[in-house]
Amino acid sequence: MLATHGYLNFPVPLILPVSPLVSNYLNHLEMEDPITNIRKEINSLTKALPRSALRRKCTIDEKLRVSLQTCPLKANEIKLEGLLPQLHNKEGRKGSMLNGLLFILNQLLATSSNGTSIGFMDFNDAYHLYCGFFTGVPPDKDTFRDSLLHPEHGLAVFIATLTPEKR
Protein backbone atom coordinates (compact mmCIF):
# COMPACT_ATOMS: atom_id res chain seq x y z
CA MET A 1 0.00 0.00 0.00
CA LEU A 2 2.68 2.49 0.95
CA ALA A 3 5.62 0.83 -0.79
CA THR A 4 6.75 4.16 -2.23
CA HIS A 5 8.25 4.92 1.19
CA GLY A 6 10.09 1.58 1.42
CA TYR A 7 13.45 3.07 0.47
CA LEU A 8 13.64 5.30 3.55
CA ASN A 9 15.84 4.35 6.52
CA PHE A 10 13.79 6.12 9.15
CA PRO A 11 10.20 6.10 10.41
CA VAL A 12 7.76 7.92 8.13
CA PRO A 13 4.70 9.44 9.81
CA LEU A 14 1.70 9.56 7.46
CA ILE A 15 -1.75 11.08 7.79
CA LEU A 16 -4.46 8.64 6.71
CA PRO A 17 -8.23 9.19 6.61
CA VAL A 18 -10.31 7.13 9.00
CA SER A 19 -12.34 4.80 6.86
CA PRO A 20 -14.59 1.76 7.26
CA LEU A 21 -11.84 -0.24 5.53
CA VAL A 22 -9.40 0.49 8.36
CA SER A 23 -12.00 -0.28 11.02
CA ASN A 24 -12.82 -3.54 9.25
CA TYR A 25 -9.13 -4.40 9.08
CA LEU A 26 -8.76 -3.87 12.84
CA ASN A 27 -11.80 -6.08 13.39
CA HIS A 28 -10.30 -8.67 11.05
CA LEU A 29 -7.26 -8.79 13.32
CA GLU A 30 -9.69 -9.78 16.07
CA MET A 31 -8.80 -6.67 18.00
CA GLU A 32 -11.29 -4.62 19.88
CA ASP A 33 -11.91 -1.65 17.59
CA PRO A 34 -10.02 1.20 19.29
CA ILE A 35 -11.71 3.83 17.13
CA THR A 36 -15.15 2.88 18.37
CA ASN A 37 -13.96 2.81 21.96
CA ILE A 38 -12.32 6.20 21.68
CA ARG A 39 -15.36 7.73 20.02
CA LYS A 40 -17.59 6.38 22.78
CA GLU A 41 -15.50 8.36 25.26
CA ILE A 42 -15.53 11.59 23.26
CA ASN A 43 -18.81 12.73 24.78
CA SER A 44 -16.98 13.06 28.09
CA LEU A 45 -14.38 15.42 26.61
CA THR A 46 -14.62 19.12 27.34
CA LYS A 47 -12.59 22.15 26.34
CA ALA A 48 -11.20 22.22 29.87
CA LEU A 49 -9.61 18.80 29.40
CA PRO A 50 -5.83 19.18 29.56
CA ARG A 51 -3.83 18.70 26.39
CA SER A 52 -2.05 15.70 27.91
CA ALA A 53 -5.40 13.94 28.45
CA LEU A 54 -6.40 14.61 24.82
CA ARG A 55 -3.05 13.22 23.68
CA ARG A 56 -3.52 10.06 25.76
CA LYS A 57 -7.00 9.51 24.30
CA CYS A 58 -5.65 9.87 20.74
CA THR A 59 -2.80 7.40 21.19
CA ILE A 60 -3.54 3.79 20.31
CA ASP A 61 0.15 2.87 20.49
CA GLU A 62 3.45 4.66 19.93
CA LYS A 63 3.11 4.45 16.14
CA LEU A 64 -0.61 5.02 15.73
CA ARG A 65 -2.82 7.92 16.77
CA VAL A 66 -6.46 8.39 15.86
CA SER A 67 -8.48 11.58 15.70
CA LEU A 68 -11.15 12.32 18.27
CA GLN A 69 -13.20 13.99 15.53
CA THR A 70 -16.53 12.16 15.29
CA CYS A 71 -17.86 13.44 11.97
CA PRO A 72 -16.92 11.56 8.77
CA LEU A 73 -13.98 12.92 6.77
CA LYS A 74 -16.22 14.20 3.96
CA ALA A 75 -18.34 16.14 6.48
CA ASN A 76 -15.25 17.78 7.99
CA GLU A 77 -15.20 20.49 5.35
CA ILE A 78 -18.72 21.63 6.21
CA LYS A 79 -17.93 21.54 9.91
CA LEU A 80 -14.67 23.53 9.61
CA GLU A 81 -16.23 26.07 7.26
CA GLY A 82 -19.05 26.44 9.79
CA LEU A 83 -16.53 27.32 12.50
CA LEU A 84 -14.90 30.12 10.46
CA PRO A 85 -17.81 32.64 10.62
CA GLN A 86 -17.89 32.27 14.41
CA LEU A 87 -14.42 33.81 14.71
CA HIS A 88 -14.10 37.49 15.55
CA ASN A 89 -10.74 37.72 13.77
CA LYS A 90 -10.62 35.33 10.81
CA GLU A 91 -7.00 36.36 10.17
CA GLY A 92 -5.90 35.38 13.68
CA ARG A 93 -4.24 32.12 14.74
CA LYS A 94 -7.49 30.15 15.00
CA GLY A 95 -8.53 31.31 11.51
CA SER A 96 -5.10 30.32 10.19
CA MET A 97 -5.43 26.94 11.90
CA LEU A 98 -8.89 26.29 10.40
CA ASN A 99 -7.81 27.39 6.92
CA GLY A 100 -4.69 25.21 7.15
CA LEU A 101 -6.74 22.20 8.22
CA LEU A 102 -9.22 22.82 5.40
CA PHE A 103 -6.35 22.86 2.92
CA ILE A 104 -4.95 19.57 4.24
CA LEU A 105 -8.43 18.05 4.17
CA ASN A 106 -8.78 19.00 0.51
CA GLN A 107 -5.42 17.35 -0.22
CA LEU A 108 -6.55 14.13 1.51
CA LEU A 109 -9.81 14.12 -0.45
CA ALA A 110 -8.12 14.89 -3.78
CA THR A 111 -8.45 12.35 -6.55
CA SER A 112 -5.93 11.38 -9.21
CA SER A 113 -6.57 11.88 -12.91
CA ASN A 114 -8.16 8.41 -13.13
CA GLY A 115 -10.64 9.28 -10.36
CA THR A 116 -9.15 7.24 -7.53
CA SER A 117 -8.66 8.87 -4.18
CA ILE A 118 -5.10 9.49 -3.02
CA GLY A 119 -6.04 9.46 0.65
CA PHE A 120 -2.74 9.79 2.47
CA MET A 121 -0.12 12.44 3.04
CA ASP A 122 3.31 12.62 4.59
CA PHE A 123 3.02 14.24 8.02
CA ASN A 124 5.98 16.56 7.46
CA ASP A 125 4.62 17.71 4.10
CA ALA A 126 1.24 18.39 5.69
CA TYR A 127 2.93 20.30 8.52
CA HIS A 128 4.80 22.55 6.10
CA LEU A 129 1.65 23.24 4.09
CA TYR A 130 -0.20 24.03 7.33
CA CYS A 131 2.53 26.45 8.46
CA GLY A 132 2.05 28.42 5.25
CA PHE A 133 -1.25 29.73 6.63
CA PHE A 134 0.38 31.43 9.63
CA THR A 135 2.06 34.80 9.81
CA GLY A 136 4.87 35.13 12.28
CA VAL A 137 6.00 32.06 14.18
CA PRO A 138 4.11 28.94 13.08
CA PRO A 139 2.98 26.31 15.59
CA ASP A 140 5.30 23.40 16.34
CA LYS A 141 4.63 19.87 15.06
CA ASP A 142 3.05 18.72 18.33
CA THR A 143 0.56 21.59 18.20
CA PHE A 144 -0.18 20.74 14.56
CA ARG A 145 -0.75 17.09 15.50
CA ASP A 146 -3.05 18.17 18.34
CA SER A 147 -5.05 20.31 15.91
CA LEU A 148 -5.38 17.43 13.44
CA LEU A 149 -6.69 15.09 16.13
CA HIS A 150 -8.83 17.57 18.09
CA PRO A 151 -12.45 16.52 18.84
CA GLU A 152 -13.98 19.89 17.81
CA HIS A 153 -11.94 21.16 14.87
CA GLY A 154 -9.74 18.18 13.92
CA LEU A 155 -9.87 15.97 10.87
CA ALA A 156 -11.11 12.37 10.92
CA VAL A 157 -7.66 10.89 10.30
CA PHE A 158 -5.06 8.47 11.60
CA ILE A 159 -1.43 9.40 12.05
CA ALA A 160 0.60 6.26 11.52
CA THR A 161 4.38 6.01 11.69
CA LEU A 162 5.72 3.44 9.29
CA THR A 163 9.10 1.90 9.96
CA PRO A 164 11.16 0.28 7.25
CA GLU A 165 11.28 -3.50 7.12
CA LYS A 166 14.59 -5.11 7.98
CA ARG A 167 15.74 -7.37 5.21
Image: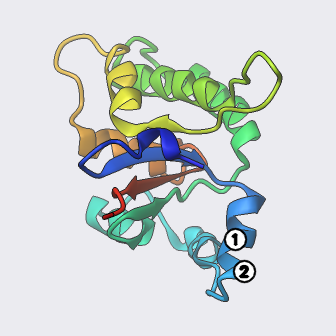
Q: CA distance from mark 2 to mark 1?
A: 5 Å
Residue 165, disc: none
- From where the camera sits, is residue 114 visible? yes
> In the image, what residue occupies the spot 42% across and 15% down?
89
* Amino acid, disc 2: His
Compared with 6, 167 (above or below) is: below
Dividing the picture into quadrants, the one containing residue 141 is top left
Determine whether label 2 and label 1 are within 8 Å by CB: yes
Asked if 46 appears above or below 141 in the picture, the reply is below
Could you say where residue 104 lies in the image, as x and y percent from the top left? 52, 27
**Quadrant location of the C terminus in the rendered image:** bottom left
Name which residue type carries label 1: Tyr
Q: Quadrant of residue 73?
A: top right
**Could one spot residue 49 in this view of the protein?**
no
Percent position of residue 28, x then y? 72, 80
Badge 2 marks a residue whose secondary structure is helix
Residue occupying the point 79% across, 30% down: 116
How far across and how far down the image is residue 108, in percent?
Answer: 61, 32
Residue reaching furthest right?
115
Left or right of 80: which side holds 117?
right
Residue 78, position as x, y percentages in the image: 73, 30
Q: Which residue is mark 2?
A: 28
- Residue at screen point 31% across, 16% down: 134
For residue 125, above or below residue 40: above
Q: Residue at x 37, y 27 (%)?
A: 125
Q: Is residue 43 left or right of residue 23?
A: left
Identify the element where label 1 is drawn: helix
The numbered dot on residue 25 is 1
